[in-house]
Image: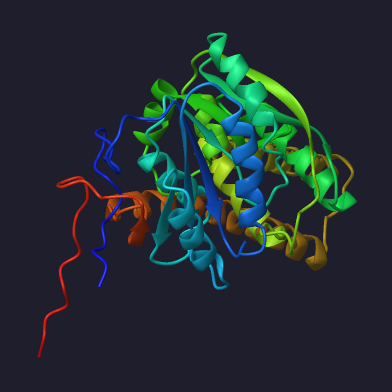
Amino acid sequence: MPVRYADPAMPDGPDTIAGDAPTLSVVAPVWNEAVTIPRFYDRCRQVLDALDGTWEMVLVDDGSRDGSREAMRRLCEADPRVRALILSRNFGHQIAITAGLDYARGDAVVVIDSDLQDPPEVIGEMVARWREGYQVVFGQRVARAGETWFKRVTAAAFYRLIRRIANVDIPVDTGDFRLMDRVAADALRSMREHHRFVRGMAAWIGYRTTSVTYARDARHHGETKYPFRKMARLAIDGITNFSYLPLQLATFAGFAVAGASLVGVLAAVVVRVFLGHELTGQATTLVSVLFLGGIQLIFLGIIGEYLGRIYDEVKGRPLYLLDTSMNVVAPIGAGRRIPPAPRG
């Protein structure tokens, strides 16, 4: 029976198997990528072996339902530089990235999806920019192969919207594919909010930042793991984490409706007193009431989104739980062991 641990205590990170810390860690979330994982490892290994220094790969299984866990086990047995974290269930892509960062030991950490849409060959260019002194190197997409026009348009619109309204400068056309040096990675690890938008958090920490451009490939196998519903949820997390504009809109709307009401009252007085006409119309009153009611419900929902995030933070639950791990030893005292269920 595997010992299960919550996410490691901050700010001290976990130890792994014996040996010096590697130069570079590659963190890759995995969800139903059994077919893709061997190819992903091969391409990464070719790139990483050509670089100076040692490396490790941290694969994080986020509750896969195919043979991903078995594929990860085979890689761990064949190459001790491959570590595997098996989460107890599906916690989501952003949490899986966080788990990998918690266990990555490298002087620099690269976050990349395991579906091969982000080409591992770009890692070499990122490392070169890191050696020039940059602490965060993010990948910026100049093309997105294999995606529908709807996804391309909505993604482009979202990145430009959030850059305008966010209180940090989030680069456009960037995902989670990036390199962070140890200082930046530890800063990101220290941020433990539950509704995570990692690309925004990476922008918030600052440090010396640059970019490399690349063309995003089509999926190597299978279907996208980010359908419209998940994209919308991620967009909401990004907006609510880094902007108060949705809340401020309630104030703006209140002033606008109050101003319009004042103009309507003055118009009614002028028509009644000076023109001698009486304004009637039940439909106008009904439409006005329904309009105001709709506005109120919309902003109650927006307030509820922010309030729900406060509630999740107050509960203080760990970000994730590990089911088991491979080539990784959880440190003593770094995680909280889950007690066995009482008998009887």
Q: Residue furthest top?
A: 132
Residue shown at 79% from the left, 46% from the top: 154
Q: Which quarter of the rendered picture does the C terminus lie within?
A: bottom left
Choose between 300 and 154: the one closer to the eye.
154
Tell me how the rendering is colored.
Answer: rainbow
- Vertical comparison of 2 with 151: above or below: below
Q: Quadrant of residue 128?
A: top right
Choose between 74 and 97: the one closer to the eye.
74
Instruction: Count numbered badges in the picture.
Output: 0
Looking at the image, residue 296 sits to the left or right of residue 205; the answer is right
Image position, residue 245 (x, y; %) = 59, 35
Q: Quadrant of residue 291?
A: bottom right
Image position, residue 7 (x, y; %) = 30, 50
Q: Which quarter of the rendered picture does the N terminus lie within?
A: bottom left
Choose between 240 and 47: the one closer to the eye.
47
Image position, residue 91 (x, y; %) = 46, 60
Question: Does residue 27 show up?
Answer: yes
Image position, residue 279 (x, y; %) = 83, 55
Looking at the image, residue 332 sits to the left or right of residue 140; the answer is left
Question: Does residue 243 show up?
Answer: no
- Vertical comparison of 74 with 24: above or below: below
Looking at the image, residue 40 sits to the left or right of residue 304; the answer is right
